[in-house]
Amino acid sequence: MTDRPEVNPSIMEIAAYVPGKSKAAPGIEPIKLSANESPLGASPKAEEAYRYHAHNLAIYPDGSAMELRTAIGEVYGLDPNRIGVGSGSDELLHLIAQLYIEAGDEAVMSQYGFLVYPIVTRGAGGTPVFASETDLKTDVDAMLAAVSEKTKVVYLANPNNPTGSYLTADELDRLHAGLPKNVLLVIDAAYAEYVDAADYKLGIDLVNNNENVVMTRTFSKIGLANLRVGWLYGPAHFMDVFHRLRGPFNVNGAALAAAQAAVRDVEFTAKLKTHNKRLRDYLVSELQSNWYRTRPSQGNFVLTEFSEEEGRTAKDAFETLLGEGLVVREMASYGLPHALRISIGHEKDMKKLVQILQSMN
């Protein structure tokens, strides 16, 4: 017997998620390019809906999120009864792990996938299994080889954070086809709004035609990061158990109202995508040299790999940018100590960043 309550041992195996820095050097106004936030802010219609909802703060929100689920269904052509809403997609990923993973179980994920996957897996008592990647891209064969009789869930970020790479529609189909029917495939499409690759697909057809696929999405990357709203689309049997576990009022009313307006404002989302592609392509083109390489991306960020040469490392580049007020994301916690992830921002900030890194040549 101990002199205090004992925590679940699996919790102590978790490396707590550490967000990127948001402050620059003292006295310098920071330009935050570390969290993949919307460079154009939120939809004006979402902001208006949020302000309008302020007079309802004493009232519980709609626990069913019916108006938001209906809006999502209408915009994407989905059955609202198969849509679930959560406090960001992070909460949804936690709930999925609690539903399907317990002590002794395993969850498979790619080597450089989203850091939340191992956290939710260990939080549920399971063991994360990391499949090696090929050139910083999810390797379908490696993922399938990592599946065992203990596997309950396979997590796939598509596109992937932090690498920006993605599986094509054919690759996604092959991954699913190789999984046992009792293994749940979770397609995390948090950056779907920014994809322009012709051979990409969300996986909605896989959800519609199978019992072991769930797709998760978020409003955080299109301007509502502060409000924490995410959603998922799954089979009927999944939705039944999902609603048994989720909190009855897990998303506040102002967030629900803003998200509903945001999903219907397809013109703003298109504007955001256009802005992102232009500056993303600009960074990929300009940030190439003998000492750094920027990879193509389908997200609202790029991953730049740096030299190990003193004075030209990722750490050196990070500190130089920080001194000029540009805060990017170090990638050591992802197992990529020689890389920085750069969120797409305003044009003037992207040009300033390029000028600084090119001057280090």
Image (cartoon, grey):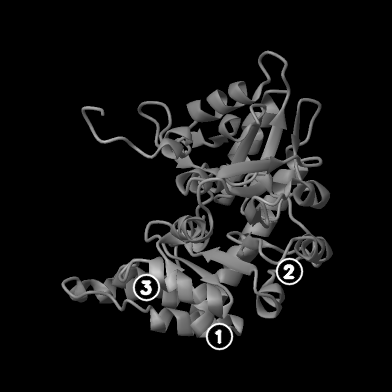
Instruction: Point out the image quarter for the C terminus.
Output: top right
Give whichever of 125, 75 is nearer the camera: 125
Q: Which residue is mark 2?
A: 201
Chain-order first, disc 2 or disc 3: 2
Tag shown at residue 4: none
Work out whether 39 lies above or below 63: above
Q: Position of residue 107 (x, y in %)?
A: 61, 49
> From the viewer's perspective, is residue 234 above or below residue 357?
below
Q: Is residue 295 above or below residue 200?
A: above
Image location (x, y in percent) of residue 83: 51, 77
Horizontal relation, residue 107 to residue 49: left or right: right
Task: State how far apart marks 2 and 1 are (Cα).
Answer: 18 Å
- Within 10 Å of the Cα at label 3, are there few (<14), some (14-19), or many (20+) other Cα atoms? many
Q: Amino acid at mark 2?
A: Lys
For label 2, the crowd category at 10 Å Cα-Cα, with few meaning under 14, some 14 to 19 and many 20 or more, is: many
Residue 350: x percent and y percent?
A: 60, 44
Q: Secondary structure at mark 3?
A: helix
What residue sits 31% from the left and 79% below the top?
62
Give the quarter of the image for residue 201.
bottom right
Residue nearest the observer in this picture, 198 or 157: 157
Question: What amino acid is found at the position of numbered circle 3 in the picture?
Answer: Leu
Viewed as shown, does residue 119 lie left or right of 177? Answer: left
Q: Name the residue tied to disc 3.
A: 256
SS for dot 1: loop
**In the rendered image, the vertical position of residue 11 relative to residue 275, given as above or below:** above
Comparing marks 2 and 1, which lies closer to the viewer?
1
Where in the figure is residue 144, as x and y percent of width and height?
Answer: 78, 52
- The residue indicated by pointer 1 is 79
The residue lying at 66 percent from left, 49 percent from top is 108
Q: Amino acid at mark 1?
A: Asp
The mark tally for this picture is 3
